[in-house]
Amino acid sequence: MSVLIVGTTALDSINTPKAKNPRLLGGSASHAAVAASFFAPTRLVGVVGGDFPQSHVKLYASRGICLKGLERVKDGQTFHWHGEYEVNMNNRRTLNTVLGVIENWQPRLPGDYGQSPYVLLANIAPSIQLAVLDQLSKPKFVIADTMDLWLNVALADLLKLLKRVDCLVLNDSEARQLTEDDNVVSALAKIHKLGPKFVIIKKGEHGSILSGPSGMFVAPAYPLLKVVDPTGAGDSFVGALLGYMASQKGGNIEKHLRKAMIHGAVVASFCCEGFGLVRTVKADKKAIRDRVKHLEKIARF
Amino acid sequence: MSVLIVGTTALDSINTPKAKNPRLLGGSASHAAVAASFFAPTRLVGVVGGDFPQSHVKLYASRGICLKGLERVKDGQTFHWHGEYEVNMNNRRTLNTVLGVIENWQPRLPGDYGQSPYVLLANIAPSIQLAVLDQLSKPKFVIADTMDLWLNVALADLLKLLKRVDCLVLNDSEARQLTEDDNVVSALAKIHKLGPKFVIIKKGEHGSILSGPSGMFVAPAYPLLKVVDPTGAGDSFVGALLGYMASQKGGNIEKHLRKAMIHGAVVASFCCEGFGLVRTVKADKKAIRDRVKHLEKIARF
């Protein structure tokens, strides 16, 4: 079944201690859609400006991603994030953000997009996530991702959103901020009370945690000898996760979610091995399968 | 088979944001020996001063721990650590340390202790760990634990030790410090080159990682809704781990190590739920088995 993904389609300029990479294809929806496209037909809803390179559009198309929902505002500027990583690659700092065409965007779902069964409201303003949610009719599974920025500037909208999604994905520091609770386990219980039946906490190199009706699941991260650029790893994780869910027929949703998190961890590991989407797009089903098998071996006792 | 544990037998005064607890039974060998005693006959090698309460000795004895190797220096002072935890319980600060009788201690193994098959050189000065190692004859499996202090003040001794042990246990920040490598995965490879065939990295609430000849294993931590005092959790982890190893007959050592880490995580979780050893000693085999089963459920996919 198909996956609908709304989020940012951006240009990322990323500095690391070793390199500067200007205007890479980035954004939450870009990473998530490419990751989902390994597993399921993927529909992208986003907006770009006149400055968005055609080569980036071609990359989406080469993945078979449906682009009917990709708007282009000819006289607008594409959302641009400029950031840098410290030596250990865990701490990042935003140098500059240009919202551009994202700022006044009113997303409109084309054709039958409103009937998409699996929907990812990737990281973008909660008001935009809500606007997409309003255009859906009976989706099977809706995941929302978010970030600390929205906890700071759009908490009311985010709380509205949480009442209406099946699953929230966020990282551990965001979970602590949202609940004002330093203990991740008790924070999970508090997040469930805000609405979502499922909560997934991303912990980077430490893996991820699922909390749902039948308890918790702890997924390892894929161990990498070298991290080149972690930008988009969380988006890749959740995109692959939802793509995997959409590729499964029937069965138990929590069982699927566990395997989906493992597939998410694997696609995120490819993302971290190159700048932007450079490494991700070089992966294929066999490479993903091999790393999933490796993770199974790593986690077995 | 029996387990020999050498390390500190101490008094811990622990402040948390919520309470002050003076002169608790603490020390690496105390926590490790109590943890090991759930699984195997345990021998404790340590030194205390005249101020060490008899009630603490009784606690060891009540666990069936053999105390032939516990020296008492009547006119000496017991090693005393005074520390405090911040609100999130992850950061701790040493307020004061009195080395006391530890400072000039020359450990001597009594009777047949030198023939102990499973040996834990728990966290203490590497020179003391080496002195014990010199008195062993053909142990089956020797684990060394350490801490950042010894990396700073006794690195040469520690490096000598690493060439002679089967397994090193340390936490992730210590692994980074020892190897000057921010990536835990590549740090593991560097630590193997220093000697140990097996390396285990403790990551607190994020679990632990084993690296050995047949690859890596990632063990989850036991999820706790409330952490009262994490002091001694790492010692409990490694003590239970070695106790479990000693309780297994034949079979594959790496397979046993994986299960041993799970049992270590469980006993460490009990340790965190109370000050000092208060909660640990209230656990029993059934409570441990229940949490192991829970961890199996949490990690399965």
Image (cartoon, coloured by chain):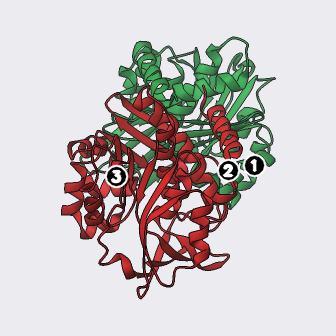
Chain colours: A green, B red
If you read the primary sequence from the N terminus, does the residue marked by circle 3 or circle 1 appear first? 3
**Callout 1 amino acid:** Ala
Choose between B191 and A179: the one closer to the eye.
B191
Query: Which circle marks residue A185 in the picture?
Result: 2
Q: Disc 3 to disc 1, how far (Cα)?
A: 31 Å
Chain letter for the residue marked with disc 2 in the picture: A
Location of the C terminus of chain B (image quadrant): top right
Q: Tell me the quarter of the picture where residue B99 sits.
A: bottom left
Q: Are marks 2 and 3 on the same chain?
A: yes
Q: Is residue B193 left or right of residue A93?
A: left
Find numbered disc 2 in the image and state the secondary structure of the residue it sits on: helix
The image position of residue A14, as x and y in percent, is 35, 45
Callout 3, which amino acid?
A: Asn
Residue at the spot of label 3? A88
**Subunit ID for the residue under disc 3:** A
Would you say B182 lies left or right of A197 here?
left
Q: Residues within 10 Å of mark 1 (few under 14, many from 20)?
A: some
Above or below, comparing residue A260 to residue B17 in the picture: above
Q: Which residue is mark 1?
A: A189
Decide if residue A106 is in sight here.
Answer: no
Q: Which mark is residue B68?
A: none
A228 or B225, nearer to the observer: B225
Q: Which kind of residue does numbered mark 2 sit on? A: Val
Q: Name the secondary structure under disc 1.
A: helix
